[in-house]
Amino acid sequence: MRIYNRYILALSISFAIVTVLFAVRGVKNITVYFSVFAIIHLASTTLFVYFNPKARRALVPVTFAVFLGFMSIVILKIMEMMRG
Amino acid sequence: MSGKSAYRFLGTSLLAGGVILSPFSYFILKSTPLVALGVSSLMLGITCLALQRAVPSVSSEASFAFLQIAMENTAALIEELGLSTKAIYLPASRRDGTAQAIIPLLPNTKLKFDRKLPGRLIVCYGPNPDDIGIAVSTLGSASLKNLETKPGTNAIEIEDALSRILVGSLDLATSVRVIVGEKKVEIEISGPKSHYDNIWFYRCLGSPLASIVATITAEALDKAVMIKSEALKKNKSHIEIEILN
């Protein structure tokens, strides 16, 4: 199995497990789901160190977008907490 | 469907599914887990579309056909010339910028590759008239392009370079272990997808796996190397590389 297939499969399985676990637990906040998805995405992309340079470059904008989304959630939460 | 179009199809389908499912689940079904499913589908779709840019547009069947033709031509040349000596793998610095292997016409144990050799098919590598060999490009020569920087001389750096090529780029193995000695380098490749056959071509240049390993080792150490032995034990390929000078 190609390394790209393993990467996609790892992401899909992780996302599916998180969604099922959170749904069973009754988590109703979508930002919690997205934050965990973002962490999984960033961690998996880092862990698959043997991607060729072309793939790594192709994934940079995706990783950046995910990181930006995650940071937006964090900033919004901090602002919410500061407002009391 | 080629690899590239398969990723494009999967990416577009997941992206479309995510775009439809997320707002539908949020506004109509009011189900957070389904919104999350849509979001994860969107993320996977975008990742697949990004990855399809890295997948080569040439199918693996076409690549295999090109490789087979190249190997058959080199094998015919070696057999026709009656070369039976083991190839010596040289780093790019000893050739005209391309790492290549030299098959000496006669077995010679006192080879010295301390100068740059001309970038020709038939090369004279020593002071004697018999010091002539055939210089050929190998699988490893092409694979080196997948490395961003030249690997370092220690075992970890060689292991990292080999893993990037054999595991990441070519998908020929599952993991690689390297032990660097004073006169030899031992490499253990787990889950190899190419094996050694006792054919003339492999006896000269080694199996495709050993050839890649030898080229990268020569490049990393910046020294001429030779494949000393290769064996398959318990689905692990053990390759021993001899450092020449």
Image (spheres, rainbow, N blue to C red):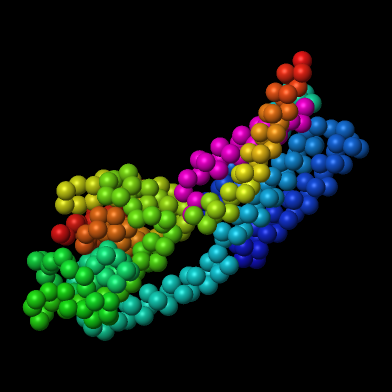
* Quarter of the image where one finds residue B201: bottom left
Q: Residue drawn 17% across and 78% down?
A: B124
> Could you tell whether B201 is left or right of B143 in the image?
left
Q: Is residue B84 in view? A: no
Q: Position of residue A12 (x, y in %)?
A: 65, 42
Q: Nearer the viewer, residue B138 or A16?
A: B138
Q: Position of residue B45 (x, y in %)?
A: 70, 50
> Could you tell whether A29 is left or right of B221 in the image?
right
Magenta: main secondary structure equals helix
Q: Residue drawn 59% across and 50% down?
A: A59
Q: Residue drawn 50% across and 51% down?
A: A51
Q: Residue drawn 47% across and 57% down?
A: B169
Q: Is residue A39 in view? A: yes
Q: Position of residue A4 (x, y in %)?
A: 56, 52
> Could you tell whether B196 is left or right of A64 in the image?
left
Give the position of the C terminus of chain A as an image quadrant.
Answer: top right
Q: Is B3 above or below relative to B16?
A: below
Q: Position of residue A75 (x, y in %)?
A: 69, 29
User: Which residues, given as a range, are shown in magenta?
Assistant: A29-52
- Asked whether residue A51 is drawn in magenta, I would say yes
Q: Is B104 above or below relative to B144?
A: below
* Quarter of the image where one finds residue B138: bottom left
